[in-house]
Amino acid sequence: MRKLIWLLLALLLLPLAAGGWFYAQVGKPYAPASAVELMIPPGTASSHIARMLEEKGVVSSALVFRLWLRLNHGENGLKSGLYRFEHADSMRTIVQRLEKGDVMHFSVTVPEGLRNDEIIQLLATQTGVPVEKWQQSLKSLISGETEGRLLPETWEYTKPLDPQRLLKTMVQAQQQLLDSLTSDAEQQQRLRIMASVIEKETALDRERPLVSAAIHNRLKKGMPLQMDPTVIYGIYRTKGSFSGNIHKQDLSTDTLWNTYTRKGLPPTPICNPGAASLRAAAAPADVSYLYFVADGSGGHAFASTLAEHDKNVRQWVRIERQRNQGK
């Protein structure tokens, strides 16, 4: 009889002991031998995820991990992505991270003033996603002319990276900014084009409204813009490349973008302008400037008359001559 009682007690206590052991395993912090980066592809079964975690030393038991999922969470709520495990965490915490999608985040900075092909090359280099995928993604997002539709900024992304998703974010961010400036689609494109010229003419935020004013004023007077970056872009679009040096002959060689040979704005943006240039295009400074030239200090000297401009040009020539003599 006594043996039977002990047997019954054992049978009663065994599940309790097993349950205690199980919950101890779930709550016990466990750390990999070294930091682990683990990519979980989309659609990966929870059983496979459990094995991956055990093989990498992130959890002590794949079986316990799966049982905990079944009992408390279900097996279909784990999110894909690239995870990093380096600290001692319990299975509870790891499951919470996987359900939340607490993946690694990366960023890429796209400078203002780059052409689409330059941005795509930069993105391909920085992310490891082939150029061809970026090109295909951009074409699938935008029909027709694509130049100048991306907003330069520092953008975050996760892995595996979806090129179309990141480019769509850049396109939508620019569109949202333009929508805040005007609701007219034609005017928005005009701002893109004007802002792209501003972007290539100055890197100084304080000068952007002044360059914008010079562009607006010249257009109102029917004067050609005569801005070198449009010539350079025309060479790129017609020849596929630019040597880096602009020559006097280039100024008189007609292309659709050459604002020395054609009046008005170029037919397309000549780069991807930043937010400051887009805002400056929509809000030029209230000045009568028609001309500007480099002042030798990284900025520009602005003028309202040709006589003033010629004086500024002579000053710039003197500065350049002195620099060359000092070399």
Image (cartoon, grey):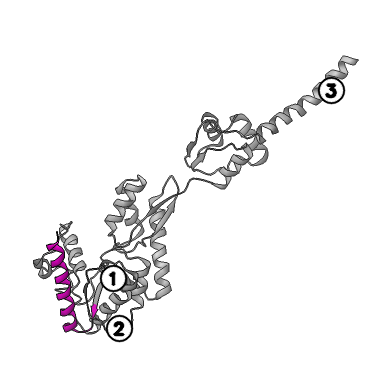
| Part of the protein shown in magenta | 302-327
Of the two numbered discs 3 and 1 on the same chain, state the one appearing first in sequence. 3
* Dot 3 amino acid type: Leu
Q: Nearer the viewer, residue 269 or 48?
A: 269
* Dot 1 amino acid type: Ile
Of the two numbered discs 3 and 2 on the same chain, state the one appearing first in sequence. 3
Q: Disc 2 marks which residue?
A: 287
In the rendered image, residue 47, in percent from the top left (x then y), is placed at 56, 33
Q: Residue at x 11, y 66 (%)?
A: 250
User: Is residue 153 toward the left or the right of residue 16 in the image?
Assistant: left
Q: Residue furthest left?
A: 249
* Dot 2 amino acid type: Val
Q: Nearer the viewer, mark 3 or mark 1?
A: 1
Q: Disc 3 marks which residue?
A: 9
Q: Disc 1 marks which residue?
A: 198
Q: What secondary structure is marked by label 1? A: helix
Q: Give the Cα distance between marks 3 and 1.
A: 85 Å
Q: Residue at x 27, y 84 (%)?
A: 288
Q: Give the Cα distance between marks 1 and 2.
A: 16 Å
Q: Nearer the viewer, residue 288 or 189?
A: 288
**Does the magenta-highlighted stretch encompass residue 315?**
yes
**Label 2 packing within 10 angstroms: few (<14), some (14-19), many (20+):** few
In the rendered image, residue 287, in percent from the top left (x then y), is placed at 30, 83
User: Is residue 124 toward the left or the right of residue 305 in the image?
Assistant: right
Q: What secondary structure is marked by label 2? A: loop
Q: Nearer the viewer, residue 258 or 111?
A: 111
Q: Residue furthest right?
A: 1
Q: Where, by quadrant of the figure, is residue 98 drawn?
A: top right
Q: Where, by quadrant of the figure, is residue 166 drawn?
A: bottom left
- Do we see residue 136 in this rendering? yes
Quadrant placement of the N terminus = top right
Q: Residue at x 60, y 38 (%)?
A: 89
